[in-house]
Amino acid sequence: MIERLTESAGAACLVAWGPLEEDLARRISGATPDALPIGPLSVRELVSVTSIVDLFLGNNSGPLHVAAALGVPTPVTRRSTDLRRFAPRDPSARVLSRSLPCSPCGRGRCWHHTCLQSIAPREVIEAARAILERAPVRRAA
């Protein structure tokens, strides 16, 4: 997914990680020459880096909510939890989810993850590309 987005949007990608995620981050970074590994980061460093990016891509986690709180646009893939309760409140967040017979789901764990598997990588890329096209150009400090 990073390859497609960096190729089509001319974007660079910063890859941060937390405890026990270094192998995954290195695989992601190795997927494209436009990805720069910058982790692991402390919470303070994560907030600082996130505050200057044009787009945040990540799973439903603390860093995603940090990005939303900072007003950083993000396409959010959501499992079938109650979006009114758990989705980022920032209007720049683009929530990608599916309405399924099992939603909203109150379970912490799910055996089939149909809600996430039904969202194609191209949908995330299209949402990210649309966000980048609408974003104002940032000037260097």
Image (spheres, rainbow, N blue to C red):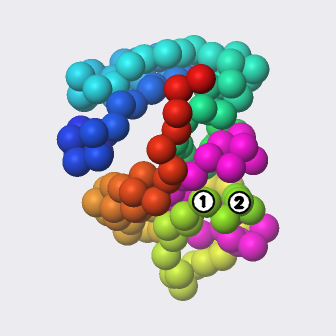
Q: Is residue 74 above or below residue 57?
A: below
Q: Which mark is residue 90?
A: 2
Quarter of the image that includes the C terminus: top right
Dot 1 surroundings within 10 Å: few (below 14), some, or many (20 or more)?
many
Q: Secondary structure at mark 2?
A: loop
Q: Residue at x 66, y 43 (%)?
A: 67
Tag count in the figure? 2
Q: Amino acid at mark 2?
A: Asp
Whether residue 57 is visible to the viewer of this picture, yes or no, is no
Q: Residue 15's x, y, as percent?
A: 45, 26
Q: Residue furthest bottom?
A: 101
Q: Residue 25's x, y, as percent?
A: 42, 23
Q: Amino acid at mark 1?
A: Ala
Dot 2 surroundings within 10 Å: few (below 14), some, or many (20 or more)?
some
Task: Give how far apart the Cα atoms at labels 1 and 2 are.
Answer: 6 Å
Q: Residue beneath label 1, please?
A: 93
Specify the quadrant of the image occupied by residue 29.
top left
**Magenta segment range?**
66-87
Q: Is residue 5 left or right of residue 99?
A: left
Q: Is residue 72 above or below residue 113?
A: above
Q: Is residue 140 above or below residue 54?
A: above
Specify the quadrant of the image occupied by residue 44.
top right
Q: Residue 56's x, y, as percent?
A: 53, 43
Q: Residue at x 34, y 61 (%)?
A: 126
Whether residue 83 is visible to the viewer of this picture, yes or no, is yes
Q: Secondary structure at mark 1?
A: strand
